[in-house]
Amino acid sequence: MTPEEILAHKPRTLTQAQREAYFADGYLLLERLIPQDWLDRLHAVTDRLLKESRGVIASGEVFDIAPGHGAEHPKVRRFKKPDEVDPEYWAFAQDLIADVAADLVGPNVAYHHSKLNFKWHDGSDEVKWHQDIQFYPHTNYNVLAIGTYMADTAAGDGPITVLPGSHEGPLYDLYDDDGNWTGSLKDRDAAALDTSKAVTLEGPAGSITVHSARTVHCSAPTAADNAGSQRPLLINAYNSADAFAFTPHPSESVNSRKIIRGEPARWAHLDPRPCPVPPDWSKGYTSIFAAQAGEDKKAGASAKKVSGGMM
């Protein structure tokens, strides 16, 4: 569907002005949208899984752990596929934020994936400038991510920073000059960004951020001396039912591609703008943290450029 067609449908949750702002800017920040009851439920299951992570010594199917992780000082960078790990996360993904997704990608919504990211206030948790769609290209660009701030998130906590309007700009090559996947813009491309226009999306617990898969974004390393916070950010990604992935899913769960609003599409919508393609994720995927830190390259993981693109 085109933005005009999407906007012609009656909204479920957002105002028409918010929807128009999303299509103009490529992002939204909605403060305190998530009720406290939901936050309490999410924290309960998250705390349980963090305790379990203390006994983990290497990244695997559930936990992506950072160097220095241990039982006394756990440093989990990400819960992988939380929607599959615990039914509470999946119930949340189908609740209010799915209505937000429907207001922005159209009434027929497919689920793509989830992840729960943490930051540990040691200054080593930067996420560099990147766009999402290169990780999972689709036949059109009605693909977005909704982040839920489970705790108050201020500038020192490394919240997401976006470049307004960048979703209408170029898609960048997320490989280095040697053809290795890095999951981030090359230094020269990042240096050319007009970061004077960047907006850092701070918000209290229960706020959500929404950004288009084409929007250029990053998150700064944490600076606050607040080791107890962890800045848990629960991310759920959705796409219009008429947007079909044409490369392997990087982190497929049992819920990926389920229709959670409306009906399945009988026709694919094809956007004529081309899209770079990622490595062949059917051979394995780690995380954006590992890719940007060069851990995949050091480990000899298969993350080389492949040929192809979207017509």
Image (cartoon, grey):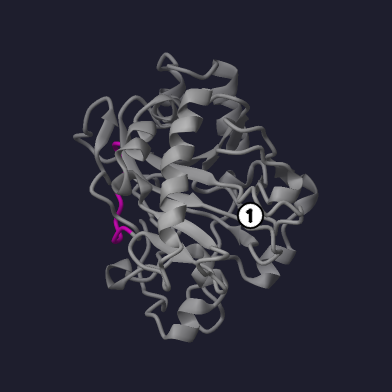
Q: Nearer the viewer, residue 169 or 75?
A: 75
Quadrant (top left/top right/bottom left/bottom right) for the N terminus? top left
Q: Tag count in the figure? A: 1
Q: Is residue 174 above or below residue 48?
A: below
Structural crowding at the residue carrying mark 1, measured as other residues with C-alpha within 10 Å and reported as few (<14), some (14–19) or many (≥20): many
Residue beneath the point at 43% across and 60% down: 53
Q: Amino acid at mark 1?
A: Cys
In the rendering, at what x and y percent does residue 44 appear?
44, 39
Q: Is residue 276 visible?
A: no
Left or right for 255, reference 102: left
Q: Nearer the viewer, residue 67 or 238?
A: 67
Residue beneath the point at 37% across and 63% down: 309
Residue segment shown in magenta: 241-249
In the rendering, at what x and y percent does residue 82 appear?
37, 48
Tag 1, which secondary structure?
A: strand
- The verdict on residue 26 being magenta is no
Q: Is residue 5 above or below residue 87?
A: above
Residue beneath the point at 33% across and 67% down: 281
Q: Is residue 310 above or below residue 43?
A: below
Q: Which residue is mark 1?
A: 218
Q: Quadrant of residue 307?
A: bottom left
In the rendering, at what x and y percent does residue 31 appear?
63, 27
Overall secondary structure of the magenta stretch?
Answer: loop
Q: Quadrant of residue 243?
A: top left
Residue beneath the point at 65% across and 54% down: 219
